Image (spheres, grey):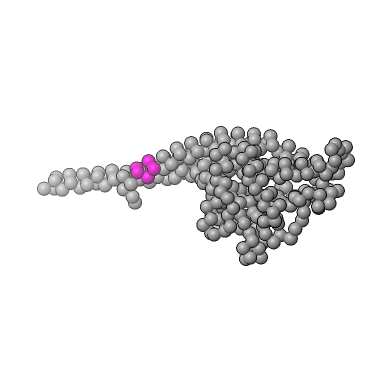
Amino acid sequence: MANLKEVRNRITSVTSTQQITKAMKMVSAAKLKRATNAIVQLRPYANKLKELLSNLSASLEDGSSPFLQQREPVRVLVVAVSSSRGLAGAFNANVIKTVNNLIAEKYSEQLKAGNVSIVAIGKKAQEYYQRRKYNVIGNNTELYNNLNFANASLITESIMEGFLKCEYDRVEIVYNHFRNAAVQFLFTEQLLPVPKTENKEIKDPKEQVKTTQVDYILEPSQEEIVAELIPKNIKIQLYRAVLDSVASEHGARMTAMDKATENAGDLLKALKLSYNQARQAAITTELTEIVSGAAALSSN
């Protein structure tokens, strides 16, 4: 059994850790509220834009927009949206695992040929793929310091430019889709070329995008409107994915810190019990020594 000083030091250490985890939970809860408001406000616009574009582009030929051109995916770009900080449970690990599985299952031949590139949004994914010698394009770790549509659009514009120059034949994005503070799930979607119809299954029924055909009266022409909307839609979808990831990160961190605080409380109970047992054993030993000493003196 550990001595009293070791147990006291351990109790002090765990108490300090518990205070830190409580503070981090409170900070994440405050940030989660702002992040949730941002993504909730953007989703209706992003979904309606996608629905409108799906209706308009359904009758167009692939050549009507360079972003609709379906090409053989010889060169692939994967956008991995992680966070720049840890202590969020398996948040970043799950993103990296999903990206690795996507590449291994779908683009293994391209990976062997060296035709898989990574755009990492967030320091954790950036560092992971740089250490493993992937072709990581750019450094976007500063995006979270000033996250807004303009800064996110700079990343999207570079991706679209690479697609137009045939540097990539397909672009896929992996991010955490935010449902609530306790639930986030990984979602993979094709960013480029833009799918004409949205038939991906989304687990949250509220997020399902309608694809019913609507007969719009258009001014100017359908081709001009689609040419204007497609680049905007691509930027909006990437910005939405980043906002989803930010809200998911704070939710995951809040949940992780809550669990850590609870575990610290359980550990403190066990340590205090151990401390009391050690203290009682020390007192018993001292009393035994006193009684033995008194008995020895009286016998003399």
Residue 12 picture location, percent across and down: 37, 41
Most extreme residue toward the front is 165
Q: Is residue 37 visible?
A: yes
| Left or right, 170 with reference to 260 | right
Q: Is residue 1 left or right of residue 139?
A: left
Q: Residue at x 52, y 52 (%)?
A: 127
Q: Residue 130, percent across and down?
A: 53, 55
Region rendered in magenta: 8-13
Main secondary structure found in the magenta portion: helix
Residue 6, x across and y down, in percent: 33, 47
Q: Residue at x 84, y 42 (%)?
A: 222
> What is the number of callouts on the image?
0
In the rendered image, the vertical position of residue 128 relative to residue 40, given as above or below: below
Using the image, determine if residue 133 lies above or below residue 140. Answer: below
Give the camera-side residue of 62 and 269.
62
Indicate whether residue 217 is drawn in magenta: no
Which residue: 71% across, 60% down? 73
Of all residues, the one furthest to the left in this rendering is 300
In this view, the residue in front, 166 or 131, is: 166
The quadrant holding residue 294 is: top left
Q: 50 and 91: which one is in front?
A: 50
Q: Is residue 127 above or below residue 35?
A: below
In which image quadrant can residue 205 be found? top right
Q: Residue at x 63, y 65 (%)?
A: 113
Give percent across and percent down for residue 91: 57, 48
Q: Is residue 259 visible?
A: no
